[in-house]
């Protein structure tokens, strides 16, 4: 008896027809990717705070320039160590012809650049307050600060000043504080006019400021005499 063996086709599909259960996508359009952005950074714009700061600096420079008009002396005062109350009291003690401002050295330097006041450069260090004197009476303008120093026992001193384009260091302030007043110059003029010619020659050989003051006083005297007649 012969037994016939029957062969059935295999149920396993061929390799080429095997279903892939891998979750990894094979097509490019199926690939999962995060959105990409341009690598270049957006343009930066100045902040409002920076703009305000720049505006304040410009205003300070303009304020200093305005104070320099009709200014006879500009002095720097050591500011570090002052209390708010002390500084307020100091401002109140000054005459109307003097103004005291607090400003950064860089801003003051920018305001005086290219002017005779640029001689004040040696003072551009540390913290300073700036005294603008709008009168020819220099000793009277400096006296209130000396009085303030004694009464309040303040050690802060002048760090320098410029008068008629010349720089005066802390040790030179005695020259500024001992300058003759207008009344003294008038008295000197009258004495010169009533004395021999050599007295007038001596007056004319005095410093330029004294000569100018003498001439002004003489012109004023002539005007008063002509007006009276």
Image (spheres, rainbow, N blue to C red):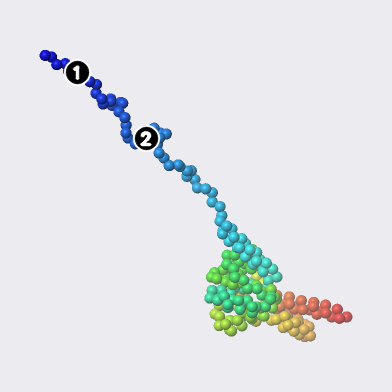
Judging by the rendered image, the residue that carries numbered circle 2 is: 25
Q: Is residue 18 above or below residue 85?
A: above
- Dividing the image into 4 quarters, which one contains the N terminus? top left
Find numbered disc 2 in the image and state the secondary structure of the residue it sits on. Answer: loop
Q: Is residue 30 above or below residue 107?
A: above
Residue 19 location (% of width, % of height): 31, 30
For mark 1, give the secondary structure. loop
The location of residue 209, given as percent across then percent down, is 70, 76
Q: Quadrant of residue 205?
A: bottom right
Question: In front of the other: label 2 or label 1?
Answer: 1
* In the depicted structure, whether residue 25 falls above or below residue 165: above
Residue furthest to the right: 229
Quick one: label 2 or label 1, which is nearer the N terminus? 1
Q: Are marks 2 and 1 in contact (CB under 8 Å)?
A: no
Q: Quadrant of residue 74?
A: bottom right
- The picture places residue 184, in percent across and down from the top left corner, at 72, 83
Q: Residues within 10 Å of mark 1 (few under 14, many from 20)?
A: few
Residue 20 visible (yes or no)? yes
- Which quadrant, please, contains the C terminus? bottom right
Total numbered labels? 2
The vertical placement of 5 against 67, above or below, is: above
Q: Residue at x 54, y 74 (%)?
A: 80
Between 93 and 3, the residue placed more toward the observer is 3
* Alpha carbon separation for disc pair 2 and 1: 42 Å
Q: Residue at x 75, y 82 (%)?
A: 186
Is residue 198 in view from this perspective?
no
Name the residue furthest top: 1
Q: Which residue is mark 1?
A: 6
Instruction: Farthest residue to the front: give it.
Output: 1
* 2 on left or right of 11: left
- The residue at 54%/49% (across/down) is 43
């Amino acid at each position: 008896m012969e037994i016939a063996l029957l062969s059935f086709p295999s149920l396993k599909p061929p390799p080429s027809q095997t279903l892939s259960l891998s979750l990894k996508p094979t097509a490019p359009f199926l690939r999962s990717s995060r959105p990409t952005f341009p690598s270049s950074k957006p343009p930066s714009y100045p902040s409002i705070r920076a703009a305000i700061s720049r505006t304040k600096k410009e205003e300070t420079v303009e304020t200093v320039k305005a104070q320099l008009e009709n200014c006879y002396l500009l002095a720097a005062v050591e500011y570090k160590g002052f209390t708010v109350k002390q500084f307020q009291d100091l401002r109140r003690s000054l005459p109307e012809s003097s103004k005291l401002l607090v400003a950064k050295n860089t801003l003051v330097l920018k305001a005086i650049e290219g002017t005779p006041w640029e001689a004040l450069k040696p003072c551009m260090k540390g913290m300073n307050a700036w005294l603008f004197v709008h009168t020819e009476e220099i000793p009277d303008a400096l006296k209130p600060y000396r009085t303030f120093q004694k009464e309040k026992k303040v050690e802060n001193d002048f760090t320098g000043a410029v008068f008629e384009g010349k720089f005066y260091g802390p040790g030179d302030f005695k020259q500024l504080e001992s300058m003759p007043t207008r009344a003294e110059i008038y008295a000197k003029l009258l004495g010169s006019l009533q004395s021999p010619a050599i007295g007038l020659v001596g007056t004319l050989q005095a410093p330029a400021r004294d000569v100018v003051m003498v001439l002004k006083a003489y012109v004023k005297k002539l005007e008063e005499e002509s007006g009276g007649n």
